[in-house]
Image: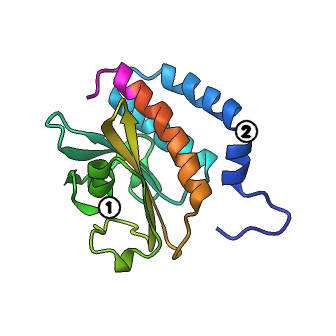
C-alpha cells in the first residue's frame, strides 16, 4: 500500500480509535452463532478496517493440534462467504502452525527466507500470523500476507492482536476449545 502524504495510515487510524473500533467489532461478533460466523466476521472486519490485501482465519480442529481455514479476504475468497482450496495445517507446520504452536505472533519480513512458509493462492512476500488465544489456549490464527517485502510493522501486530483477542473471546463463548 502506497500512501500519499495527506492520506492517513489505516492501521494508525484504527489504533487511534481502538475503544470505539473494538466496541463495533464486539457488536458484530455478538450476532455470531457459530465459529464459521465468527471467522467470516473477523475476516471481513479486519480486511476492511485494516485495508488488508489478504486475510485468512484458521480455527483449531477438534483434535486440538490442527488448524483449518474457515474464511478469507482477498485472493482465496471467490464470493461472499465462499472460499476455495482450503488447507489444513498441523500445529508447528508453516508460519501459521508455528504461530499456533508458540501462541505468539509471527512477523515474516521475507517469506522466501523462512523455511516454514507454506505457499498458497495469492501468496505474498511478507506475512503476519496472530493467534486467537483465550485463557492460554490457541483457538485459531489470523493470517495476512502482502505482496511487498517487509510490509508489516509493530502497529500491524497491535491491530491484529486487538482483533484476535475479541474474536477468541467469542469463539470461546461458542465452545471452541
Circle 2 packing at 10 Å, graded few (<14), some (14-19), many (20+), is few
The residue lying at 27 percent from left, 68 percent from top is: 116
Question: Which numbered marker is on residue 136?
Answer: none
- Image height check: is 95 above or below 33? below
Q: Which range of residues does the magenta coloring cover?
A: 171-177
Residue 165 picture location, percent across and down: 48, 35
Q: Which residue is mark 1?
A: 95
- Give SS at disc 1: helix
Residue 135 picture location, percent across and down: 36, 29
Residue 155 picture location, percent across and down: 62, 55
Judge whether residue 152 can be spotted in this image: yes
Q: Is residue 56 left or right of residue 118?
A: right
Q: Quadrant of the C terminus?
A: top left
- Give SS at disc 2: loop
The residue lying at 54 percent from left, 45 percent from top is: 46
Q: Which residue is mark 2?
A: 17
The residue lying at 70 percent from left, 30 percent from top is: 20
Amino acid at each position: 500500500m502506497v500512501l500519499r502524504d495527506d492520506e492517513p495510515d489505516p492501521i494508525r487510524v484504527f489504533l487511534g480509535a481502538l475503544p470505539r473500533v473494538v466496541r463495533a467489532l464486539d457488536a458484530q461478533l455478538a450476532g455470531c452463532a457459530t465459529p464459521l460466523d465468527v471467522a467470516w466476521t473477523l475476516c471481513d472486519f479486519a480486511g476492511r478496517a485494516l485495508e488488508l490485501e489478504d486475510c485468512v482465519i484458521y480455527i483449531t480442529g477438534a483434535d486440538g493440534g490442527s488448524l483449518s481455514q474457515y474464511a478469507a479476504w482477498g485472493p482465496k475468497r471467490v464470493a461472499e462467504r465462499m472460499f476455495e482450496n482450503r488447507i489444513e495445517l498441523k500445529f508447528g507446520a508453516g508460519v501459521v502452525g508455528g504461530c499456533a504452536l508458540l501462541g505468539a505472533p509471527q512477523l515474516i519480513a521475507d517469506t522466501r527466507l523462512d523455511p516454514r512458509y507454506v505457499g498458497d493462492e495469492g501468496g505474498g512476500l511478507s506475512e503476519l500470523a496472530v493467534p486467537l488465544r483465550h485463557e492460554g489456549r490457541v483457538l485459531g490464527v489470523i493470517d495476512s500476507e502482502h505482496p511487498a517485502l517487509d510490509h508489516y510493522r509493530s502497529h500491524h501486530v497491535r491491530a491484529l492482536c486487538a482483533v484476535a483477542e475479541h474474536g477468541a473471546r467469542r469463539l470461546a463463548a461458542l465452545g471452541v476449545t
